[in-house]
Image (tube, rainbow, N blue to C red):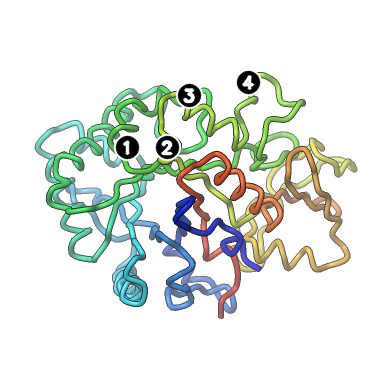
Amino acid sequence: MTLMQIAPTNDESSPMHRVCYITNWSRYRSGEAKFEIEFIDPFMCSHIIYAYATVDDKKPEIIPIQKDDLEHYRELALLKRTNPNLKVSIRLGGKMSQYTRYLKQSKMAAQLVRSLIWYMATYGFDGIDIALEFLDADVPEDKAALTTLIEELIKQKRLMLRSIITLTAAPFVENLLKVYDIEKIGNLVDYINLMTFDFYGPWDEKTGVFAPLFHQHYQVEAESLRNVDGLVKLWLSLGIPRGKIIIGIPAYGRSFTLSSRQTSLHAPANGPGYPGRYTKTRGFLSYYEVCEKGQSQNWQRVWLDSEKAWYMTNGDQWITYEDVDSAALKAQYAKAERLGGVFIWSIDNDGMYN
């Protein structure tokens, strides 16, 4: 069973969005891990977000990451023929600094937004997901530029008919208000996709659950919001309507290399774990790579009831990961809290389809 299969259904009594991210680099994986648009059930997701497009280094124009992405765009359009209710957005990514230099100047900002609108119309996208990286809390220009981008899009929304504008927000806690102008953004965007994962990871000196559902007794005050419920409550306290918040479910795990014989939660670690057979990235394992390891008797799986999460260990390797049990609890949480829904990052990590 994949994680997306446990996401809440979108019924009339409790409408919940099921948002599926797809990465453009997943098609370059080898063997069974190679992912194609044709593997997608067009009725599995209410929304699909394709990652990603970016901005040209030399002029304020939106461009694909790879030329092959254009073929994926055409294939996504075919999914909408099968399911006319499916909404497909393009994720706008890249470093914030790439955009800030254009958005500081009103003429270039207008050109950038016109290019984005043309891009969406030309390739049949229903919306735009703004997910810019490396926003710097110490660079106020980044915060202003992000707000300008969204404001300019809203001004031109009449040219985009019923286009959807979403913001994917990193799990900032301490510097949240320095990075996002939440009052303005909250009134402008249709939804905010909260990255409710990677609260802890192999960049830390000890093992930790990367996507805990609730606050834990051992979390010091500075870490008290590093959990799904804490981050959701923080955004709600800042005035964001419940129905605009969509929480993330990670279809992957984070791995650590242990630095002692301890194998429990909070065991000392000295960096990321070994790369997966398919994704080939230290400290990261797709859900299907985690499942593959879990089938071996060499791995010991441990359920943490207070965190509502699994981890597993083998020798000096320690993995925190999402599975159907923990993902189902997060979907239930989203429904109980009357949130806008859940998103999966990303369905190409969720299972092998070929």
Q: CA distance from mark 2 to mark 4?
A: 21 Å
- Where is residue 130? Give x, y as percent: 34, 45
Three-letter residue code for mark 3: Ser
- Where is residue 58? Give x, y as percent: 20, 48
Query: Which badge, 2 or 4, is on the more N-terminal residue?
Result: 2
Q: Which residue is mark 4?
A: 222
Q: CA distance from mark 1 to mark 2?
A: 8 Å
Q: CA distance from mark 1 to mark 4?
A: 28 Å
Instruction: From the image, state whether disc 3 or disc 1 is nearer to you.
Output: 3
Q: Which residue is mark 3?
A: 237
Name the residue: 55% across, 75% down: 30
Compared with 191, 84 (above or below) is below
Name the residue: 29% across, 61% down: 64
Instruction: From the image, state whether disc 4 or disc 3 is nearer to you.
Output: 3
Query: Which badge, 2 or 3, is on the more N-terminal residue?
Result: 2
Query: Which badge, 1 or 2, is on the more N-terminal residue?
Result: 1
Q: Which mark is residue 97?
A: 1
| Mark 2 secondary-structure assignment | loop
| Mark 1 secondary-structure assignment | helix
Q: CA distance from mark 3 to mark 1?
A: 29 Å
